[in-house]
Image (cartoon, grey):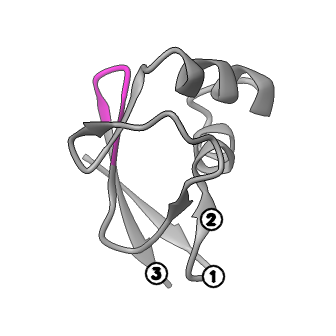
Amino acid sequence: MRNVILSKPAVELYKILKFEGLFGSGGEAKAAIDAGLIKVNGEVETRKRRQINAGDVIDCNGEQLQIRLA
């Protein structure tokens, strides 16, 4: 599990996927979310702009991201 440190309380899901290098662009991240390939806290998430907060866990292609606040 990889830790991701946020500098502000909530960040949109697709932005985290893009900035963490899981997808090459925001468009690719949004397409993966639309396709149901991303889970947040164990449940499939299809909202691209879902606000991700400290304590959330994102599952993407077998990789887990633990979200923390700086």
What x and y, as percent, mark residue 69?
46, 81
Residue extent of the magenta highlight: 58-63
- The kind of residue tagged 1 is Lys
Circle number at residue 66? none
Instruction: Assess disc 3: are there few (<14), some (14-19) or many (≥20) residues with their C-alpha within 10 Å of its C-alpha.
Output: few
Q: Nearer the viewer, mark 3 or mark 2?
A: 2
Q: Secondary structure at mark 2?
A: strand
Is residue 4 toward the left or the right of residue 24 in the image?
A: left
Residues under numbered marks 1 and 2 in contact, where contact means CB atoms less than 8 Å apart: yes
Could you say which quadrant of the image residue 43 lies in?
Answer: top left
Residue closest to the eye, 59 or 31: 31
Image coordinates for residue 29, horizontal then vertical, percent? 65, 28
Mark 3 or mark 2, which has the lower sequence index?
A: 2
Tell me how far mark 3 sits from mark 1, CA to CA: 7 Å
Q: Name the residue: 62% across, 34% down.
A: 21
- Using the numbered discs, state the Cα–Cα distance from disc 3 to disc 2 in whole angstroms: 11 Å
Say whether disc 3 or disc 1 marks the residue closer to the N-terminus.
1
Residue at image mark 3 = 69
- Residue on which the image places disc 1: 8
Q: Position of residue 7 (x, y in %)?
A: 62, 80
Answer left or right for 18 relative to 4: right
Residue plotted at (73% across, 24% down): 24
Label at residue 11: 2
